[in-house]
């Protein structure tokens, strides 16, 4: 059973990544760059200049690749890693690590609560949740989680771009205080709309894939 759950989780995670990555790229650019007027301006300018969105398996590399507007800056994930290592050393590969932990640890704890509550609300007692219940519960779980995660997600993105063409921050607290002083409390909710728009389909697809695969493998 654990192996089945691993395979189901791996496949459903990949499905969620494919569904959500384009919006994630736009979200990262809005959080770390101020040259865009809004969501649609960012989408239009990205598509016009670059054609397609990039992908990367590591969060730091992903953010750097998503933010590059000159295609000659990084030739790919491996080149990006080597550039970061050459410029910043081993520690540079963990830039934004504490902000990432502060974003993910509490939010993963929250993640399954709205899913379970919504599933129970949309499922008759004694029955298995149907596809609609799983889709809605997964989508709502994603939106609720990202609503709490977005402030620290902004900080994480800014720290990861620090030294990579973005403003340089001394650490998580310095990034928080400088961002708050210069841009106000609203800065911590940059990308919230996009996070929500991305979170619903991504998590709906992830949970539906997972539940469907578990049922298929355990029949």
Image (cartoon, helix red, strand yellow):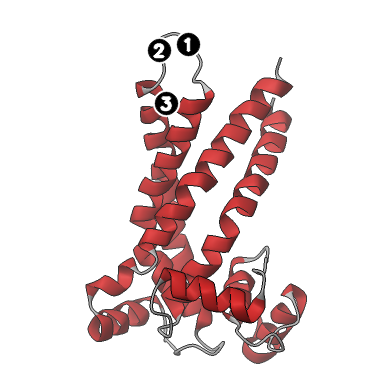
Q: Callout 2: helix, strand or loop?
A: loop
Q: Residue at x 44, y 89 (%)?
A: 167
Q: Is residue 111 found left or right of 88 in the rendered image?
A: left
* Label of residue 127 in the image: 1
How crowded pointer 1 is (Cα within 10 Å; few <14, some 14-19, many 20+) is rated as few
How crowded pointer 3 is (Cα within 10 Å; few <14, some 14-19, many 20+) is rated as many
Q: Residue at x 63, y 27 (%)?
A: 212
Across and down, in percent, residue 15 comes to: 65, 46
* Label of residue 28 in the image: none
Q: Residue at x 63, y 76 (%)?
A: 65
Question: Eyeballing the image, is 131 above or below 148?
Answer: above
| Picture quarter with the C terminus | top right
Taking the image as drawn, is residue 169 in sight? yes
In the image, farthest residue toward the top: 126
The answer to whether mark 2 and mark 1 are in CB contact below 8 A is yes
Question: Eyeballing the image, is 219 above or below 4?
Answer: above
Q: Residue at x 62, y 34 (%)?
A: 209
The mark nearer the N terminus, 3 or 2, is 3
The mark nearer the N terminus, 1 or 3, is 3
Q: Callout 3: helix, strand or loop?
A: helix
* Label of residue 119 in the image: 3
Residue that badge 2 annotates: 124
Q: Is residue 80 found left or right of 44 in the rendered image?
A: right
Q: CA distance from mark 3 to mark 2?
A: 10 Å
Taking the image as drawn, is residue 97 in sight? no
Towards the viewer: 185 or 100 = 185
Across and down, in percent, residue 70 comes to: 64, 88
Q: Callout 1: helix, strand or loop?
A: loop
Across and down, in percent, residue 159 comes to: 47, 78
Q: CA distance from mark 1 to mark 3?
A: 11 Å
């Amino acid at each position: 059973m654990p192996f089945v759950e691993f395979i189901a989780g791996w496949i459903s995670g990949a499905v969620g990544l494919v569904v959500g990555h384009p919006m994630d790229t736009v979200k990262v650019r809005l959080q770390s760059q101020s040259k865009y007027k809004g969501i649609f301006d960012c989408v239009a300018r990205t598509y016009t200049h670059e054609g397609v969105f990039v992908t990367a398996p590591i969060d730091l590399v992903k953010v750097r690749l998503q933010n590059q507007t000159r295609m000659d800056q990084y030739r790919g994930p491996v080149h990006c890693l080597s550039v970061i290592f050459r410029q910043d050393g081993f520690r540079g590969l963990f830039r934004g690590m504490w902000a990432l932990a502060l974003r993910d640890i509490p939010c993963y704890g929250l993640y399954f609560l709205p899913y379970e509550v919504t599933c129970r609300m949309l499922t008759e007692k004694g029955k298995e949740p149907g596809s609609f219940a799983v889709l809605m519960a997964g989508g709502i779980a994603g939106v609720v989680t990202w609503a709490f995660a977005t402030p620290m997600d902004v900080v994480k993105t800014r720290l990861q771009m620090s030294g990579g063409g973005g403003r340089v921050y001394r650490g998580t607290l310095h990034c928080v205080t400088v961002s708050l002083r210069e841009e106000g409390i609203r800065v911590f909710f940059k990308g919230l709309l996009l996070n929500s728009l991305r979170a619903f389909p991504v998590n709906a697809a992830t949970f539906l894939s997972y539940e469907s695969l578990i049922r298929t493998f355990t029949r």
